[in-house]
Amino acid sequence: MAQTYRGAGVSPGAGYGPVKRLTREVPQPAPDARHAGDAEAEARRAVAAMEQTAQDLTARGERAGGEAAEVLSAQALMARDPALADDVRRRVGEGADAARAVSEAMAVYRDMLANAGEYLAARVADLDDVRDRIVARLMGAPIPGIPDSDSPFVLVAEDLAPADTAVLDPAQVVAFVTREGGPTSHTAILARSLGLPAVVACAGADAIAEGTMLLVDGATGEVVADPDPAAVEAATAAAAARARAAAQSTGPGRTADGHPVPLLANIGGPQDLPAALENGAEGVGLYRTEFLFLDRSDAPGHDEQVAAYRAVLEAFPGGKVVVRTLDAGADKPLAFLPAPAAEPNPALGERGLRMMRRFPETLDAQLAALAEAERGTDAELQVMAPMVTDAEDSEWFAAVAAKAGVQQAGVMIEVPAAALRARHIAASAAFFSIGTNDLTQYTCAADRETGGLGRFQDPWQPGVLDLVAVAASAAAEAGRPCGVCGEAAADPLLACVLTGLGVTSLSMGASALPLVRAALARVELAQCRAAADAALAARGPEEARAAAAAALPGLAELGL
């Protein structure tokens, strides 16, 4: 008999197949495990396992590419750390066997990371993963991670590390379901980039037995165990229709009656340009420049910054490129931009523009590099500041941007206060770009990485839609464009609602562009506005989603 579970659908599409569970159990070496007496041979065994693990992680990164390659490369460096190897040799010399020596040595590193602040503490899970892989090799146990299979399956797990998600093969893993995670978590973002149906924060996922046939709807968040054949047929037909529609969508973003909605790409650097161009991005709506600055002891130099920015501008002649200035602080601390003191709630502390106001020379240098990068290109450069809170913030940023030679300086709307007072901010901001991930986090006071709060991390929350409507209305009254660059733009149904709320452009991960383009092409602007009104009138996110879908019957053939 079919049994239905519900979670947050974070990547549209349907997947059907038998359940396989993520392997995480690794036997732990006994506290008094000792080697047989040949310390030199035991140390060689330990170091060999560390190097094999590093090679495996590097190979996985090369297969995945992009941001995933950076994540896995960093993990490989952990396994190859010379100081760690020396510590392991020392412990083996004192009698510990290889697995115990590795486990104990990495426990020291783990404590150091856990106590080093938010960003480094977040890497504890990556370090644990490296440790488990090495220990499993040494103890002859299965390597933890994605299970092997000769046939496609649905992956079910408590949670997935970004490194696990990044290397999923859509040809083998037809969907995944996790008990933890949120709609704006990195795992969800990577699932969308892979085009893999996914449901997170699914209560009861732990109880689904291995081998159970599972139907996963990544749009609605519905997970059905042992479904009726008719339900499987309907879901797979809808998924096939979406795939066909996405493959056939071409040209600029616009509604069926010709209302233009430019579709832009979110990128982290020039390495993301091929995917953006392949999927028909009309420009860049969010260039996250912090990837140039992370994991360095000093800021990148002028020439390096100019080259990175110019490469993106030259890829879109005549198009728009929106660059976000350095968003340091909170979960992205930089050694050369320290917080004034320990912050009990870093997400509410000195991050984004707040940090740049303490270190204006860093912002001045970035703005100067951007202004120079634009010279000689045909792209339209727009530069925006993150974490703007009030009109005074916006005026300060507009002034320093103008001094550096930047012609169009705008702001991100991600703080509720900024949305509520957007009519005042519009006086100094050339444009708005709404970051729905953080706007949702701050509106609902729900950390985007906390799985148990998935209900409050949903951009369909009517309170979030209210704020989008206020900001878009204020922008329109002031004659300013107002885009959305948060993950909400990648939801085809919500993209239509955002258009109805008055949003003027949508920016998203490149792989989401075709389906959003196809969805817009099936509805008229008046329908988008009716859907927006219906969503705003709803009492909760599920009701908002259902009301919007009812107002947009043209999307039914896509199963949205």
Image (tube, rainbow, N blue to C red):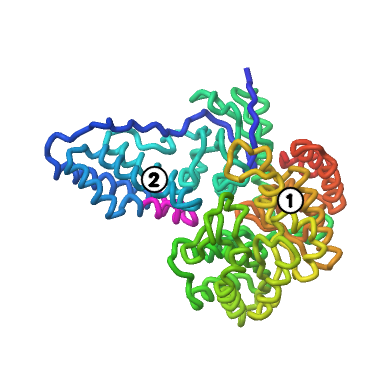
Which residue ends up furthest to the bottom in the rendered image? 376
Q: Is residue 445 above or below residue 221?
A: below
CA gap between label 2 and label 1 equals: 43 Å
On residue 359, which mark appears?
Answer: none
- Neighbour tally class for label 2: few under 14, some 14-19, many 20 plus, Cα within 10 Å: few
Q: Nearer the viewer, residue 22 or 26?
A: 26
| Residue 153 horizontal side relative to residue 513, left or right | left
Mark 1 lies on residue: 495
The three-letter code of the residue at mark 2 reads Asp
Residue 71 magenta:
yes
On residue 111, which mark appears?
Answer: 2
Question: Does any portion of residue 114 appear in the rendered image?
Answer: yes
Q: Nearer the viewer, residue 423 or 6?
A: 423
**Residue span colored magenta:** 59-76
Residue 146 magenta:
no
Q: Is residue 100 above or below residue 343?
A: above
Q: Quadrant of residue 405?
A: bottom right
Q: Percent from the top left, x then y, of residue 16?
A: 58, 32
- Neighbour tally class for label 1: few under 14, some 14-19, many 20 plus, Cα within 10 Å: many
Q: Percent from the top left, x then y, of residue 430?
A: 75, 70
| Rendered residue at 45%/56% (across/down) | 70
The three-letter code of the residue at mark 1 reads Ala
Q: Quadrant of residue 398?
A: bottom right
